[in-house]
Amino acid sequence: MVRSKFVKRSVSVLMAALVVMGGAAAFNGNVSPEVSAAQTSTAQTKATLANQSFLSATAITKGSSVTVYGKMGTTGSVYNYAYYYKKHSSDTWMKIKGYSSTTSVKITPAAATNYDIKVYAKDAKGKIYVKTLYLKVYAPLVNKSTVSKDKIALGSSVTMKGYASGGSGSYEYAYYYKKTGATTWKTLQKYSDSKTATFKPTEKGDYDLMIKVKSPVGGIAKKTYKLNVLNRLVNNSTVSKTVVEKGGTVSVKAAATGGFGGYTYSYSYRAKGETTWMLLKGYSTTTIYKMTMPDAGTYQVLVKAKDSAGNVVSKTLTVTVNVAGLEGKVAAINSTIIKAGMSEYEKVKAIHDWIINNTQYDTIGVITGKVPATSFTAEGLFETHVAVCDGYSKAFEAMAKQAGLSVNRVTGIGYSSTGSEIHAWNQVKVDGKWYNLDVTWDDPTEGNSAGNNLYYNYFLIPDSVMNKDHVAQSTKNTCTAAQPVDKLLSGLVELERKDCPKTYLCDTDTKFKLSIQSMSATVSQTYKFIYKTDSSSKVLQMVQDNMPAGDYRLSLSSTEWKINGYFLVEAKVMVN
């Protein structure tokens, strides 16, 4: 009798703890009655295969219910079912419902953990069949998503961040919005594993935002937010001057409209082409910031305007700082022709070519004896693009110095077929060696126009060549290095080939002969030969002696080429 009372009392406590109502029970895990030995006999376990009991779901979240179905695989017999459970980590089974004809019970687990569930099926003869089922209970799915702001200015955006806990993980997020008062949500981003979405309203007003999170177990949890959108925040900042001389001052005036008011401003700058901004002043209510521009160049000034809601609009202003006078003009020109990584040779050639291509020798002034003062200065050359040797040499000196080259200007006497004259030229150091250079005489006066006849007869030559027609009367350096003809030829021949693909460099008579013989007598086309010779008179004879046989006409011309000792021979083959 004592045992009987104990069993009844245990079952009573269990039923109260599970709150069984109409076949439903809630797990609380506080009661742990043991299952009797008769329910775990060897005979029972051998017959478990006939028990086909099952769960409505094998995984749920805490607070949800699961139905346990009692079922046998055979028909024609009447079975009574009993239902027990335990936490997987526990050794104590607790009764959900004793033997009855009830074929299903609904249970609501009270803890998020793993459970074992046993269903006992007993036939009319008292034979028992056992089936063990397993249930995973997750913590409830909780939507912990956020939005970056609850109010913004039109033109700004808000970041929606999906975040969740509970459920079975593997979350997917969807993002929605609508105008407050509207009934239909608009999809901003469909379900995916993306944890962020950006919403940028196109109209001002009040909006509702919603983030849904979905888990394989736990269903869908949604969360809504309010967003207030006011007039667009506009950055109206200006700068007092867009062009200023080196050492000058500019005032940056910050201003903004729209948004939520309460504006603060920050100021930064950088040289054009750079990627990093240098902060001048952090956010404050300062609306005027003065800048002194110490160096020449182009600068960008960044003004950020922030309203009381934290919305930020940036505006970039540009200021050009020029160097006054000659220095500024030289810097401006060199910035277009001197490139990063250039060798000293390339810099010298770029300056030499720019002066010749942009300057006309003042032949009229020399002939009439009325050479203006501007023709004797570098400033005059840059302004009028007309000069005599003084202007040429001074311009080269100024440009070379600005480019970081060692340069010297020499004055003396120049001798030509027409006599002698007071003259000026330059010397420049390239790769540690001094060379002579006469930009004026590399710009012959024939044609009398800027850029006409670009020559290199006096480009980086030694004293042994220069002294033949130049006598220095001022201090000069000794120049013994030979002219870098190979460098010149390499670049100049390629330029000729761009104009005429059939261009050949012939630095010997043999190469010239073979090149002429290679001309096609069956295709009309133009050939160019860069021919090195000490006698221009033999050019025509060489061509006539080596022309290929055929029915064609030949147009031939020969002129002195860009480098002393070389001739440009142009042959046009016209097939009859």
Image (tube, rainbow, N blue to C red):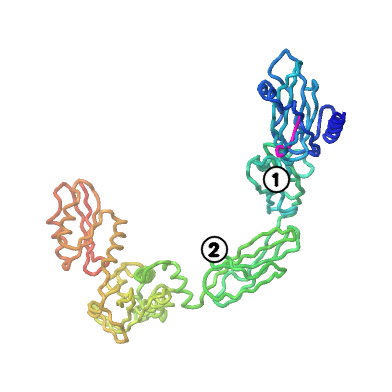
Classify mark 2: residues with Cα within 10 Å, few (<14), some (14-19) or many (20+): few
Q: Quadrant of residue 408?
A: bottom left
Residue 232 horizontal side relative to residue 511, left or right? right
Tag nearer the camera, 2 or 1: 1
Reply yes or no: does residue 374 show up in magenta: no
Report the Cα–Cα distance between label 2 and label 1: 38 Å
Q: Amino acid at mark 1?
A: Ala
Of the pair 262 and 361, the residue shown nearer to us: 262
Q: Quadrant of residue 445?
A: bottom left
- Residue 498 visible somewhere in the drawing: yes
Figure check: 120 above or below 322: above
State the residue at coordinates (31%, 60%).
495
Residue beneath disc 1? 164
- Can you name the residue that lies furthest to the front here? 1
Figure check: 525 above or below 132: below
Residue 486 horizontal side relative to residue 33, left or right? left
State the residue at coordinates (24%, 70%).
564
Span colored in magenta: 84-89
Classify mark 1: residues with Cα within 10 Å, few (<14), some (14-19) or many (20+): many
Of the pair 420 and 456, the residue shown nearer to us: 456
Mark number displayed over residue 275: 2
Mark number displayed over residue 37: none
Where is residue 268 shown, x and y percent of the image? 61, 67
Figure check: 129 above or below 137: above
- Residue 576 visible somewhere in the drawing: no
Q: Secondary structure at mark 2?
A: loop
Q: Amino acid at mark 2?
A: Thr
